[in-house]
């Protein structure tokens, strides 16, 4: 098991410009909430690889990990676990020159890297658009709410009531013209 780190002192990892380091660490991304539903990393932690290098004016970093995320399927609401791959990069330029806001990392303060916050946000961005228990998930019946995954699709059927907007047309008595042959 890799050492756990929430806050990492980058000056100890890469001390001089041009230095680089690769660390395997356990990160705890925390819980994610989408549409009122909780999603979390199985075991609460994931082993991550952090590549950090010191530039003349700051740091360049890359964080990679695979997390087994558990939560409800968006179609059938059954528990599901999906492996989510994270590959995120950050640059911290603390030279103070210019207004290059895109070269300032919100996760670095001085020489300290908030690894837990970065892992949380990177995981949130890497989450699949639809969190499914399987690609073939049929979801829930819109009429009765029963799971359509439990049986054959053709066995689940409901009588469809006629659309009430067509009632007046049904009252019309139309006569067919006799055909002359």
Image (spheres, rainbow, N blue to C red):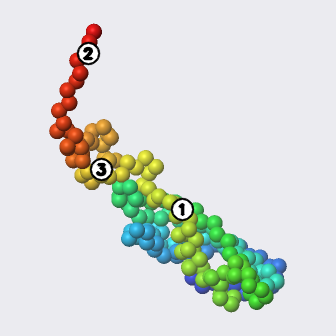
- Local packing at callout 2 (Cα closer than 10 Å; few below 14, some 14-19, many 20+) is few
Q: Residue at x 70, y 82 (%)?
A: 101
How many marks overall? 3
Q: Which residue is mark 2?
A: 179
Tell me, yes or no, whether the two marked residues, 2 and 3, touch with CB atoms within 8 Å.
Answer: no
Q: Quadrant of residue 47?
A: bottom right
Where does the image place residue 134, in percent across and percent down from the top left? 44, 51
Marks 1/3: CA distance? 28 Å
Where does the image place residue 75, in percent across and percent down from the top left? 38, 55
Marks 1/2: CA distance? 68 Å
Label located before the other in sequence (1 or 2): 1
Q: Quadrant of the C terminus?
A: top left
Q: Which is closer to the viewer, label 2 or label 3?
A: 2
Q: Which residue is mark 1?
A: 84
Label located before the other in sequence (1 or 3): 1
**Please, is residue 146 above or below residue 35 in the view?**
above
Q: Quadrant of the N terminus?
A: bottom right
Q: Residue at x 67, y 71 (%)?
A: 89
Q: Quadrant of residue 73?
A: bottom left
Marks 2/3: CA distance? 46 Å
In the image, taking residue 181 as reference, residue 1 lies left or right, namely right
In the image, taking residue 27 as reference, residue 75 lies left or right, namely left
Q: Secondary structure at mark 3?
A: loop
Q: Which is closer to the viewer, label 1 or label 2?
A: 2
């Amino acid at each position: 098991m890799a050492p756990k780190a929430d806050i990492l002192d980058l000056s100890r990892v890469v001390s001089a410009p041009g230095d680089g380091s690769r660390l395997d660490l356990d990160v705890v991304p925390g819980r994610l909430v989408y549409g009122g539903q909780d999603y979390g990393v199985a075991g609460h932690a994931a082993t991550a690889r952090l590549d950090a290098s010191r530039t003349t004016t700051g740091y360049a970093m890359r964080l990679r990990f695979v997390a087994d995320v558990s939560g409800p399927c968006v179609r059938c609401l059954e528990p599901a676990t999906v492996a989510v791959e994270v590959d995120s990069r950050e640059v911290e330029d603390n030279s103070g020159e210019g207004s290059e806001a895109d070269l300032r990392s919100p996760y670095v303060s001085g020489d300290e890297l908030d690894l837990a916050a970065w892992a949380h946000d990177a995981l949130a961005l890497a989450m699949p658009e639809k969190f499914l228990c399987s690609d073939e998930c049929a979801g829930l019946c819109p009429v009765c709410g029963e799971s359509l995954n439990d049986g054959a699709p053709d066995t689940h059927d409901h009588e469809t009531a006629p659309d009430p907007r067509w009632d007046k047309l049904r009252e019309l008595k139309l006569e067919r013209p006799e055909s002359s042959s």
